[in-house]
Image (cartoon, rainbow, N blue to C red):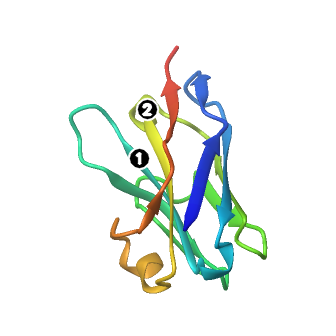
């Protein structure tokens, strides 16, 4: 079992930055892929970014060049640095983890473990 806890969300003005963190506990040795997803009201959950234990990354087109995903070597903590935030980035951001490394490149949300989410609101 793996437990995930996100933090770092909040209210930020357009053009601002936030850094989200996701801390994993439990059987972290089994984690080979971690991802950040987001879900806005009335919309489907979508990929933000994902990273493998080996450091391979995948970004949604909408976040490429503005967001950066990183992790520590043990896959205990994953960070999402978000710059140049836009109102359309407003959503609940969720951390996900799985043993399947293929989920990083696939970009699907078929992760086994999910956090509760942290709200990000971009508004003036």
Question: Could you tell me residue 68's position as x and y percent?
Answer: 64, 58
Mark-to-mark CA distance, 2 and 1? 9 Å
Residue carrying label 1: 38
Callout 1 secondary element? strand
Question: Could you tell me residue 91's position as x and y percent?
Answer: 41, 35
What number is the disc on residue 51? none
**Comparing marks 2 and 1, which lies closer to the viewer?**
1
Q: Taking 81 as reference, is 59 left or right?
A: left
Q: Is residue 104 above or below residue 67?
A: below
Tell which of 50 and 87 is nearer to you.
Answer: 50
In the picture as drawn, the residue positioned furthest to the left comes out as: 42
How would you rate the neighbour count of disc 2 (Cα within 10 Å): few for under 14, some for 14-19, many for 20 or more?
A: many
Callout 2 secondary element? loop
Q: Of the two numbered discs 2 and 1 on the same chain, state the one appearing first in sequence.
A: 1
Q: Is residue 60 above or below residue 93?
A: below
* Residue located at (59% from left, 77% from top): 31
Q: Is residue 2 above or below residue 85?
A: below
Q: Are marks 2 and 1 in contact (CB under 8 Å)?
A: no
* Residue located at (36% from left, 79% from top): 106
In the picture as drawn, the residue positioned furthest to the right comes out as: 73
In the picture as drawn, the residue positioned furthest to the top comes out as: 124
How would you rate the neighbour count of disc 1 (Cα within 10 Å): few for under 14, some for 14-19, many for 20 or more?
A: many
Q: Taking 115 as reference, is 69 left or right?
A: right
* Residue located at (66% from left, 66% from top): 26
Question: Could you tell me residue 17's position as x and y percent?
Answer: 66, 36
Counting the numbered discs, the total is: 2
Q: Quadrant of the N terminus?
A: bottom right
Q: Taking 40 as reference, is 101 left or right?
A: right
* Residue located at (43% from left, 85% from top): 102
What number is the disc on residue 90? 2
């Amino acid at each position: 079992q793996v437990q995930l806890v996100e933090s770092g969300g909040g209210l930020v003005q357009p053009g601002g930055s936030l850094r989200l963190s996701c801390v994993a506990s439990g059987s972290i040795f089994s984690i080979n892929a971690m991802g950040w997803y987001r879900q806005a009201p009335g919309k489907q959950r979508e990929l933000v970014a994902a990273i493998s234990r080996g450091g391979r990354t995948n970004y949604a087109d909408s976040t490429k060049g503005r967001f950066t995903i990183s992790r520590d070597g043990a896959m205990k903590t994953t960070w999402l640095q978000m710059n140049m935030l836009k109102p359309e980035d407003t959503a609940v951001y969720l951390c996900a983890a799985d043993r399947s490394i293929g989920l990083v490149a696939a970009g699907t949300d078929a992760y086994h473990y999910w956090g509760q989410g942290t709200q990000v609101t971009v508004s003036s």
